Image (tube, helix red, strand yellow):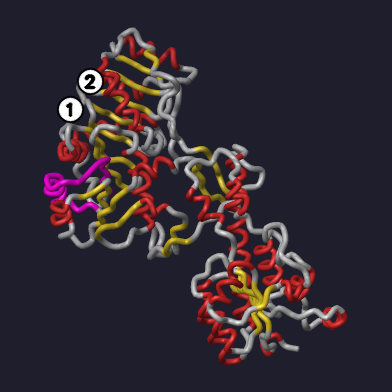
Amino acid sequence: MISDNYKIKNALISVSDKTGIVEFAAQLNKLGITIYSTGGTEKLLAENNIPVKNVSELTGFPEILDGRIKTLHPVIHAGLLADLSNSEHIKTMTEHNLASIDLVIVNLYPFEQVLKKEKEICKISSEMIENIDIGGPTMLRSAAKNYRWTAVVVNPNHYQTILEHLNENQTIPEYFRLQLAGEVFNHTAHYDTIISGYFNKINKIEFPETLTLTYDKVQNCRYGENPHQPAAIYGDFLNQFKVLHGKELSYNNVMDINAVCELILEFDKPSVAIVKHTNPCGVASANNFTEAYKLAFATDTASPFGGIVALNGEVDEDFANEIHSVFMEVIIAESFTPAALNILTKKKDRRLVVANYNNIKKSFGIHFRSLPNGMLYQKQDTKLIDNEIKVVTDKQPTSEDLEKMLFAWKVAKHIKSNAIVYAGKDRTLGIGAGQMSRVDSSRIAVEKAKISGLDLTGSVMASDAYLPFPDALMEAVNVGAKAIIQPGGSIRDPEVIAEANKHGLIMCFTGIRHFKH
């Protein structure tokens, strides 16, 4: 017997997601296919006058344990697993008067949907336990394993294609059965991963011995970082954002949006951050967003073109008029006034994005990067300082000095190492990012400030990691900086502190570094 010629006679339908199932079952009935079902699905089909038999007519055994046991029975799984090209299987089926189940339409209890309603996961919920499907995944796996003889459908989007095949040949071609089987194993793997993640969270296991991750594809990207690289977005990242205007977000847009949102969430005052290639090129806080934008933009007036701007509040007409003359790829805010939208939508390629910052902050947890056949997995860097800032020099900072240093430190945390930030009160003045040498980053930061016409006298300098030598410190001395904030922890700390004291600098240690590779 050839599976492509095997006519489908019996179908088993048991679905949680009942989208389109009544119409689909009605067509199966018209094709003369006998339908077996359970529970709510059986009731729904019967209410719509579709002939349906309970699976107990196959098993000779009733549903028990509040419906937990319905399809977990040898008669069902023999029908799903029988290889009809195997003479011994056929003999066994005949001896025990067993019928082949040729088509299975099953989708699972809505564990993931119920989980999303949980406000806080701290203990086992009886509702979650009852939404762990046992019979459904078992049937799906059995049918998918025996795909040559049992076609299996988990996705309602396939109903129409299934009917087209059945109307044409009373069967489903093997190549399509194989595709359906592959989809099933993806589906059950996703389902089990969501459940295991739930138990890991309940048990406070952050780094399980076996790591399983699962995300649904949201959309394909036009390409990745470069046009020759295919790419796609997975997970619910885009659910935290609403694009009001402009083209769909690209791979690089998403990378930059993630970087700028993590940065802007460090600030409580009205603040604006401008990012290019995931590195900040200007950050400022002020009494209003327009003033904050002017100060952030003044840090580096060349780099922001084509960059990403985020503010932790609403874009109003004044802000829109100020930013409209410079092309920014993406503007991100909590909201936009109608007057602001009227101005900013005049540039068709500019993306305007509303961000749900509260949800984004709640999602901070794990950060991972791919490796060849592996993954680096770490807790996200959500800490800023270790307990409190420690003054290590003879000269003591004023409260304003400490404000400047903390501002610079927040920005340095989000710059690629080696990172150096010069800042004044609530604004950046010069940024050096991603150099192999810390002193090179310091020189770049100074040079950028000079190009922008910004005076570093009285500024503060922040370094994302400790200063192993006094050379970067001397760069700060030479431009008239007043204070330095750094993690500390170098074996040469006493030498660096002595140099700071020699030049009358204030130096503070945070006790924590912020490498960003």
Q: Are marks 1 and 2 in contact (CB under 8 Å)?
A: yes
- Residue at point 61%, 47% (across, down): 126
Q: Which disc number belongs to residue 455? A: 1
Residue type of the residue flagged with mark 2: Gly
Q: What crowding class fits label 1: few (fewer than 14 Cα within 10 Å), some (14-19), or many (20 or more)?
A: some
**Foreground pick, 484 / 405:** 405
Residue 475 in the magenta stretch? The answer is: no
Q: Up-down: is 400 above or below 276? A: above
**Foreground pick, 317 / 421:** 317
Residue stretch in magenta = 308-328
Whole-percent x and y of residue 374? Answer: 59, 50
Going from the N terminus, do you reach mark 1 or mark 2 first?
A: 1
Q: Up-down: is 226 above or below 437? A: below
- Residue at point 63%, 65% (across, down): 185
Whole-percent x and y of residue 398? Answer: 26, 14
Q: Up-down: is 223 above or below 321? A: below
